[in-house]
Structures are given as structure tokens and as C-alpha cells.
Image: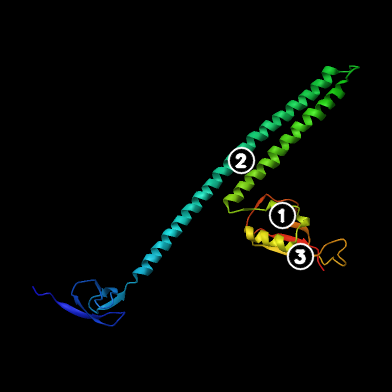
Amino acid sequence: MAVKFTSVKCPECGANLPIEEGRERVFCSYCGTPVIITNENEKVIRHIDEAKIKRAETDRMIQLEQLELEKKRLNQEIRDADRASKLQSVLTKIWIVFVVILFCICIGLIFIQGNDDDMPGWAAAFLFLFYIGAPIAVGGGILVFKVLPEKTNQKRLISQGGIRFPKKLEPFNEQDFHHMSKVLESSGFNNVECINKHDVILGIFAKADQVETVSVDGKEITSGGKIYLPDTPITITYHGK
């Protein structure tokens, strides 16, 4: 049985291409362009941009990987937050128990000592509270309600791409604002604003370009070391003419 051929033009170089009837794909023998026949009767040819298809597939795979990484990061943050919440709850209960025990000891000292001439009960209870009870209660409260939550928040910011405020800039009020802003920007902060106070007249009480205060997200800070997101607003006020 004789093979029938038909002729179509290459969409790239315009050369006539002999194609066997029934074939759906062919490569141009002149320029190598891959094409497919989408309508055999009308002999319509569509150019296949394989590089574009591969690029689209690669972009799609990258997007899927990014989504998977973001999902893992969010799940990890949820697990970390859950663990931190449980730890906070346990430590809070322990702190409350200690406070109750300390209070009971104070009450016990008052009744046990009574009106002893050497050490009245209220005096013994006061000394116990002042030297032992209060430091334990206050220290535990600071640990449970301030230190641990701050550490948890710092870890969360690190996982979100947070940046540590450089400690080498301390003390702030001895820095030149040009130097400070460059160091912050080189560290990765991208929302740094410098405000001139225009308070330098003779340069006796204040040196021109010297930093006065540094505020992060509207709150004045006096030391570095904490973690902040790159776009957190940082304001440097400095002395100037």
C-alpha cells in the first residue's frame, strides 16, 4: 500500500515539509522547528515552544516546592507555639503554687511567733517575705510572664526572616547617624528613617550628626540584640543644624 504524503509550510522558515498522512507531529528538516498538525484536513500547523513549556513546568515545580516549604514552616510555627503555650501554662501553675506556699509560710510565721518578745510574728513574716518570698515571686513572675514570651517571640521572628539589631552600635548616642543608618541597611533593614532635630547652634551642647534617640516600631530602644523583621520601621533622630 502506497504511503500518501501532503505538504505544509514550516511556521519558522517557511519551507515546504512533506508529511505522511495521519502523522500529528514533525520536525522541520531545514531549521529543526518541532510542529504538530492540529487539523489534518486544513493542514494547520502549530509551533511547539518546548523551551517555554519546560520553563513553565519548572516554574510550576518551584511554586509547588515554595508552597510546600511555606506549609512546613507554618506547621512548625504552630507546633512551636503550641509547645510554648503548654510550657507557659505549666510554669504559670508552678509559679502560682509557689506564691501560695510563700503566703502560707508568712501566715504561719505570724501565728507561730505570735507576740514573742525576741521576734514578733509580723516581723518574722515581713523579713521572710522581704528576703525570700518577694524575690522568688517577682523573679518567677518576670521569668514566666516576660522572659519566656520574649524568647518565644524572638524564635518566631527568626523563622520569618527576622534580623538582629546590631549590638556594635551601642551606645547609640555616641554614633554618627550616617554610620548607624548604613550599618542597619547593610544588616538588612529596609525601612530606616533619619530625622534632623535642627537643634545645633554653636556645637557646644550637641555635636552635629550625632544620634540622640533610636526608635523601633514606635518604641525607643537603648540597646541592640533583639530580632526584628526587615521592614520594621526604625527612626533615628539626630542633632543637626
Given residues 114 and 164, the one toward you in this image is: 164
- Mark 2: few, some, or many residues within 10 Å (few <14, many ≥20)? some
Rendered view: 202 above or below 121 = below
x, y percent for residue 104: 76, 24
Label 1 element class = helix
Amino acid type for the residue under numbered disc 2: Ser
Residue pictured at 26% horizontal, 78% vertical: 30
Q: Please say whether residue 103 is visible from this viewpoint.
A: yes
- Earlier in the chain: of badge 1 and badge 3, it is 1
Rendered-image quadrant of the C terminus:
bottom right
x, y percent for residue 62: 44, 59
Relative to 241, 9 lies left or right: left
Relative to 234, 39 lies left or right: left
- Earlier in the chain: of badge 2 and badge 1, it is 2
x, y percent for residue 74: 53, 50
In three-dimensional space, the C-alpha distance between marks 2 and 1, rounded to whole angstroms, equals 34 Å
- Mark 3: few, some, or many residues within 10 Å (few <14, many ≥20)? some
- Mark 1: few, some, or many residues within 10 Å (few <14, many ≥20)? some
Rendered view: 54 above or below 154 = below
Label 3 belongs to which residue? 195
In three-dimensional space, the C-alpha distance between marks 2 and 3, rounded to whole angstroms, equals 40 Å
Label 2 element class = helix
Q: Quadrant of residue 194?
A: bottom right
x, y percent for residue 182: 67, 62
Given residues 195 and 49, the one toward you in this image is: 195
- Earlier in the chain: of badge 2 and badge 3, it is 2
In three-dimensional space, the C-alpha distance between marks 1 and 3, rounded to whole angstroms, equals 18 Å
- Name the disc covering residue 85, or none: 2
Q: Nearer the viewer, mark 2 or mark 3?
A: 3
Relative to 74, 33 lies left or right: left
Label 1 belongs to which residue? 169
Residue contact at pointers 2 and 3, CB within 8 angstroms: no
